[in-house]
Amino acid sequence: MTTHRPPPHLNPPSAAVETLGLGRTFRGGLGWRRRLALRDVSLHIESGETVGIVGPNGSGKSTLLRLLAGVDRPSTGWVEVLGAPPTARSVRRRLAFLPDGSPFPPELSARRVLDLIASLYGFHRSERRRRIHEMLDRVGLDDAGEAPIRTFSRGMHRRFGLAQAFLTDPEVILLDEPTAGLDAPGFGVLADLLGAARQRGATTVLASHVASDLIEHCDRLALLVSGEVQRIGTPDELLGDQEVLQLRVRGLRPEGLEAVTRSLEDRGAELLEAGPAHRSLLDLYRPGEPLPPGGPPPAPVHPPGLEGDGEP
Amino acid sequence: MNLPLMRLLARRAAPLPALLTVAAISALAIAGQPGRGEIVEVSPRFEAVIVSADKLAASTAWIAGLLAAACLAVVFAARIPDRWFRGEGDWLGGTGTSRSSIVRTALAGILLGSAMFSATLGTMIGSLSGAGTGPAAGEAARPQLLELSLVAGPSRSLVLMPGERFEQELPLARESGCKVRVRVTPTLGAAGPTTSARIEVDGASREETVARRTWLEVEASRTENTVSVTNTGSGALAVLGPGPVEAWRPSDAVAGGHLRLAGHGALFIMFLGAIAFGLGAWMGPGIAAALTAALWLGARMGLSSSAAAESLPGGASLVTAIEAVAEGRSPQVLSAGLASAAAGAVLAGFLLARAALNSWGREGRSS
């Protein structure tokens, strides 16, 4: 059962999010079988930190975020956000949560839903109007602001979700699968919003099953598998491979690659993969952006000894 | 209380298609009344007792519309918490508003939506009857309606054989233009299946053939205080209790008649909506709606013969109110008992929903 008083060592002043032995069990079937969604999760997230929760589907990421947001209650353990239980009113007004999927009222327009959310947070009408206008513009939905949410595409749904999460300038932001369904400009929107949140010292927790989506935004990553935190550390500590070095080179034609390969071999290294880099889709979306000279980019070039899929 | 949330919930409790459905059913109930405006003459003797279809049109519309509105309101109200458990609670519960406040606001929205059903229905019927073809229209066009001021008489029915007489004392404090009526029906036990009867008050009398359940009515002055009914025919006559004698006084509540009926209807739908909302927070919308209907029907049947039936929203008082409007009379003002019962249901709905929403993700509903 949940304890009602936090242990004395919990929640040092700098912690924005703190959990200790957090667990969540769901009843299944007729209530006899129990499904363990989270087991003994202990996290300490500093104020201003951006932490990613990564793990496969069904590993408990969404459950953990719902517990941190205070919309679900733990079966065991303790959770504190900004020094108090997340269900406390003082905390909820400083916290924002982007749930998985798009559970927003489909019959309302984006502007109406944002107005509803901002009013639930207690913002005045004039302030609501200003924030909603700014936020819709920022996420690129200004033109679609009056359309019912049910008419949105998946990417628009996700951008709208980001808008509602960042609308109130919260101190703690919890984002569940924020990149799912995002298009290239959407990734730019997310990066922009996360950057601004970081600048004003907000703490962000992101959950995703695609680690590469989070690496560039996160100070630390926590690996969640079968409801348990397996590892936690910086992206380099968790995903970095000290044996493999990645190079991006500008100004070298494919013919020059042989010399590079030889040079690397002279130093006892082995070139695993090389080929022309791809431009970002975002670059192509920009009106008037010229295509590379000579039409489409050349086919990948493999170093001597490497064929097709890169295997020798 | 959060106005945008209340607006959303009101919209969900009474969505536009449902309002249009209720309006259409009401219109069909009026337009589709069989024999409307026609007098079918079976025989000269029976002509007087044939029920005019016009007299039934307004009450049929009210009953059909209210039944449709009540069913829809129960289903919509029961569905609202289910949407919260299916994901909406994730963002709704994560906002800075307390759960009590959200439940309170939701309930207010549902009640508002429920009231919209009744208002739509009342406006619809009012405008149709205002076209001048219905009986309610004819009555509403009168400068005055009648308002019930007294119910009196024995608590049980009694039978008058040919030549027998029934008397009931009335208070002297009556206004001019007051009408007194007695509820009667022919019954077996004498020479024929029908009979005739005479009602007398203050020297004014009226004799009618009685072939079905009906009211014998006469205008009464203030000089005497007894109403009497005499069986002047050859068949038996039953004076129907409880309280077969009614005195009606003139009222200037011409528009108020429909408003009061709308109030009765609104209380009925709010009563059901609040219970459905509370139960819906604990169980699926289908089961909650069915259980709400079963609870109400159980109460209606259990209370049918007691005085408490008057305090059940949608019970005896609503039926009486509908009958009154159909007859061009003003229904009774909402009683304190009726309002208390509806308020109790709203409180029960709030407490049920509040307790269920301690967690937005109840174990049984989470996945």
Image: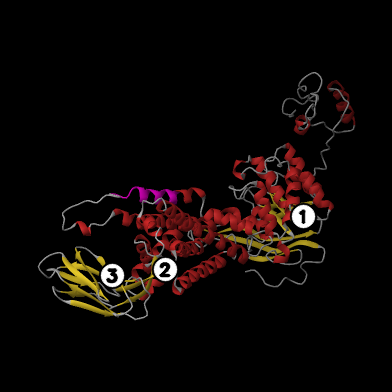
Hey, which residue is sitting farthest left in the picture?
B191
- Tell me which residue sits at (16%, 58%) in the image: B45
- Tell me which residue sits at (82%, 38%) in the image: A244
Cα distance between the residues tagged 2 and 1: 60 Å
Type of amino acid at the residue the image marks with label 3: Val
Quarter of the image that includes the N terminus of chain A: bottom right
Q: Which residue is mark 1?
A: A169
Cα distance between the residues tagged 3 and 1: 75 Å
Residue A76: image quadrant is: bottom right
Magenta segment, which residues? B21-34
Where is residue A104 shown, x and y percent of the image?
62, 50
- Asked if residue B311 lies left or right of residue B202, the reply is right
User: Do tags 2 and 3 sit on the same chain?
Assistant: yes
Count neighbours of disc 3 (C-alpha within 10 A) and say few if under 14, some if 14 to 19, many if 20 or more: many
Q: Which residue is mark 3?
A: B218
Dot label at residue B251? 2
